[in-house]
Image (tube, coloured by chain):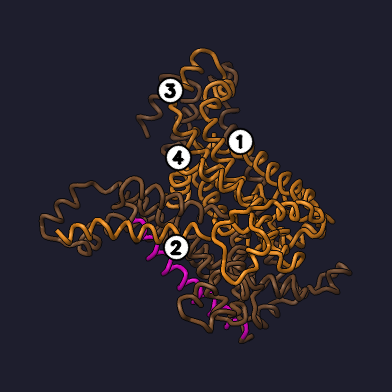
Chain colours: A orange, B brown
Amino acid sequence: MRRSLFGRTWPNVIAVVLIVFFIFPVYWMIATAFKQDRDIISKTPVFIPFDGTFQHFTTAVNAENFWTYVTNSVTVTVGAVVISLVIATLASFAIARMRFRGRKTFVLVIMLAQMAPWEVMTVGAYIITRDNDMLNSLVPLTFFYMMMILPFTIWTLRGFIAAVPKELEESAMVDGCTRTQAFVKVIFPLLAPGLMSTSLFGFITAWNEFPLVLWLNKEQGKTLPLWLSSFKTAFGNDWGATMAASTMFAVPVLILFIFLQRKAVGGLTDGAVKG
Amino acid sequence: MAVHSERVQTQSPESGKAAVAEIDTSAAGGGAKGAAPKRTRPAGGPGPGSRLAPYLLLLPATLATIALLGWPLVKTILLSFQNLNRRQLVMHLTEWTGFDNYKEQLTDPEFWAVTGRTVVFTLVNVVLIMIGGTLIGLLLNILGKKMRLALSVALLMAWAMPVVAATTVYTWLFDEQWGVVNWFLDKLGWHSMADYNWMSDEYSTFFVVILLIVWQSIPFVAFNMYAGLTTIPKELYEAARMDGADSSKIFTSVIFPNLKPFFLATTFLEVIWVFKSFTQVYAINGGGPEKLTRTLPVHAFLEGQGSQHYGVGAAIAVLTILMLGALMAYYFRIMIKQEDEL
């Protein structure tokens, strides 16, 4: 009897400890962002900010060039996602639905490209961009981000297209559609949820990118991650404002992820583990 | 394959021909090949066009990969054979120096110190991530519905947290004066930690970096482990239990053999990801104190951009890519073997 009660309790106890471990840093970020300064700089931490304030958010939003960085991040991210979706839709249709010579090679290249060591290729990208006088511009950044998310986008879209029954497309063609019409009228509408979740993953990757923008862009060309990483230098020990800035940067991604929860596990497994 | 092309042919003759022609060329290279395209021509879209179609569809992706991935990679390799410092960069000079950058690096004790450190750093991280992720995956499997949902949400938050935001939060958690970690350790009775500066020492900086990476990486392994566990038929556990197996025996003889492909693939992905991780190491303490927490990607950046020795930085980058390449080749060999087995 004692054993079974113990056996039922301990997993829950461990689970609670783990929940605290995993959620605490996220909670602490948001909580600090809302705290009064005296509660942040206090020898005994205040765990729940009862008398919250928006003052730190005001500080962060009024920081120099804040809206420029927001615009930069949004432009680069949306641009990269849209271009990669167009290119990936074409390519994934070919590898999901057609048989041709070189198909396997292409798939292998895509798998390799997905693991490209961007973190250390940055020096090459930097010199190329510099030689073309494009440093601090959003154009090269958009295209490089597009390339970072392209392999993943092709790979997941391929799965979504393959899941649409071939018979639907074929019967449309029997009814007189060309192959292009069949794609636009039959497959594309069925693909909408797939396009949606794939593009959200691309969005998250591009939104968070740091190593490349660190090489390529300065001052007016910064994106939010670069701004955030240098925030402490600019604002010293103003932890309230730093956490408010982090919160504004992270919350959109956290919300997207909750919506994507299911797809997150399945999608990444398909792409990465099942190869 | 034969069944498939037959079915296509009965329903839409044009696309079927293309498939048949393809098979012909690879198998026998028969005479029908020449005649087929001519007959399909009047149908409109397909025919010779449909043979080109896949290549046209792949063209944008191929061009993008060559220009945006291939070129920077080749450029990095070319740069590693050049003497490119601030002066040469400003004056647009190209000075080829052969293997000088490599010779310099391979005889530099600092390079080997950084490499060794990167290897140990990767091992520690991956071991912690795999053990932690596996145990949490097993835990998810035995928890009740509500508890499982709560833990999943917590894991999801850690996983989704943008890396740069996470590094900022961790510096705040571990802040010398007002950080909650130091307060907690002090409360636990470790009073010397009350005003401890975590960034002042190599090992304590690494402690923070590793905790950050492990915290963010465990959810991926745990979720996949849990997903894998749900695919194991219940009968296998029951059979093992009837044979008198205890929990650890069940893990080694039921769970592990069934999920072996998962373990191999995930371990290698984690090794590759951790080995090339840049943001966490760089953003927490910039490779300090005294260059003592530099890993290879950070070293390449700080030597290249920081000291404006772009050629040297490129050489370190190429050496890193070669090490990653060896890891990836091994990973792909495992993957391909698995595909055959499945």
- The answer to whether the residues at label 3 and label 4 have Cβ atoms under 8 Å apart is no
Q: Which residue is mark 2?
A: B268
Q: Residue furthest right?
A: B91
Q: Position of residue B287 (x, y in %)?
A: 64, 75
- Is B114 inside the magenta-drawn segment? yes
**In the rendered image, which residue does mark 3 sit on?**
A167
Of the residues shown, which amino acid type is indicated by label 1? Leu
For disc 1, the marked residue is B57
Mark toward the start of the polypeptide (2 vs 4): 4
Q: Nearer the viewer, mark 3 or mark 1?
A: 3
> Over which residues does the magenta segment extend?
B110-138
Question: Is residue A151 in view?
Answer: yes
Disc 3 and disc 1: Cα gap in Å?
Answer: 22 Å
Tell whether B207 sits left or right of A33: left
Callout 2: few (<14), some (14-19), or many (20+) C-alpha neighbours within 10 Å? some
Identify the residue shown where x is 50% and y is 68%.
B211
Mark 2 or 4: in front is: 2
Picture layout, residue A1 above or below residue B208: above
Q: Which amino acid type is shown beneath numbered disc 3?
A: Glu
Residue A224 in the image: state x and y as whole percent. Answer: 71, 54
Between tags 2 and 1, which lies in front? 2
Q: Which part of the image, by quadrant, shows the N terminus of chain B? A: top left
**Residue at the location (51% across, 27% down)?**
A190
